[in-house]
Image (cartoon, grey):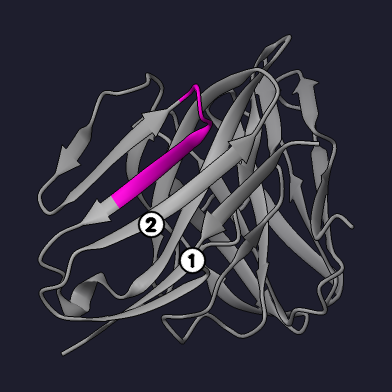
Amino acid sequence: DTAVSQTPKYLVTQMGNDKSIKCEQNLGHDTMYWYKQDSKKFLKIMFSYNNKELIINETVPNRFSPKSPDKAHLNLHINSLELGDSAVYFCASSQGVGGAVWETQYFGPGTRLLVL
Amino acid sequence: EDKVVQSPLSLVVHEGDTVTLNCSYEVTNFRSLLWYKQEKKAPTFLFMLTSSGIEKKSGRLSSILDKKELFSILNITATQTGDSAVYLCAVEAYSGGGADGLTFGKGTHLIIQP
């Protein structure tokens, strides 16, 4: 009964490659997010989609492009990978658009990306 | 399968009260337990706990881990309306190549009434 799933779990790749991370939620939520976790365990929001529409686009390099084929999926494509992209990336979903303080985001298990 | 359970799921108290939030876990190869405060956007990192019995403190917030009984508590004293949020507990596990991702609990919705 996995709520938010991500694939792959681990991704090791060379600098300069292009890679994608997939996220799927089976909760019927309208909103999905991508976060990058830094070495200090801080979660930095990257993107948010509501019903396939981009609503949050923080300052991330253009090499990162989210794609939402439907509201249950939000994929993250990264072009020309750099060493600094190495991190754990988390996908999350919530029912609404995060405007209410009592709304929980459900997180996936994370994808550990290592760029060599 | 790794599991993180938070309780209570929701809590409504008055300003000035002290609250205790609970997080229990079942994880293979435990590495650390993290607490986050989630308001309108990204969760804010609060604490990372790796050792039993050592309290971490930040202002009115404190947290402690019990690795024998597999739980952690987050205490907030003299609560203020700004403490209203969802508090998330997450557990990090080791895998062969280093730390795994995180397994998150469902959160405790805390509402502080004036």
Q: Give me the residue at 14% from left, 60% from top.
A: B77
> What residue range appears in magenta?
B67-74
Numbered label attached to residue B8: 1
Residue position for label 2 = B21
CA neighbours of label 1 inside 10 A, class few (<14), some (14 to 19), many (20+): some
- Residue A52 higher or lower than B25, as above or below: below
Q: Return the disc, 1 or 2, that comes first in the chain's sequence.
A: 1
Q: Chain of mark 1?
A: B
- Name the kind of residue labelled 1 in the image: Pro
Say whether residue A93 is magenta. Answer: no
Element marked by disc 1: loop
Q: Give me the residue at 75% from left, 18% from top.
A: A14
- Who is closer to the viewer here, A14 or B93? B93
* Residues at discs 1 and 2 in contact (Cβ within 8 Å): yes
- Residue B47 higher or lower than B55, as above or below: below
Q: Compute the Cα span from label 1 to label 2.
A: 7 Å
Question: Left or right: B52 with respect to A8?
Answer: left
Numbered label attached to residue A27: none
- Who is closer to the viewer here, A92 or B62? B62
- Who is closer to the viewer here, A111 or B111? B111
Say whether residue B73 is magenta. Answer: yes
Q: Give me the residue at 69% from left, 29% from top.
A: A113
Q: Chain of mark 2?
A: B
Question: Residue reaching furthest top?
Answer: B96
CA neighbours of label 2 inside 10 A, class few (<14), some (14 to 19), many (20+): many
Question: Residue reaching furthest front?
Answer: B69
Spot occupied by residue A82 in the image (x, y as percentages of width and height):
61, 27
Report if residue A40 is visible in the image: no
Element marked by disc 2: strand
Spot occupied by residue B11 in the image (x, y as percentages of width and height):
39, 76
Question: Left or right: B99 with respect to A103?
Answer: right
Question: Residue reaching furthest bottom?
Answer: B114
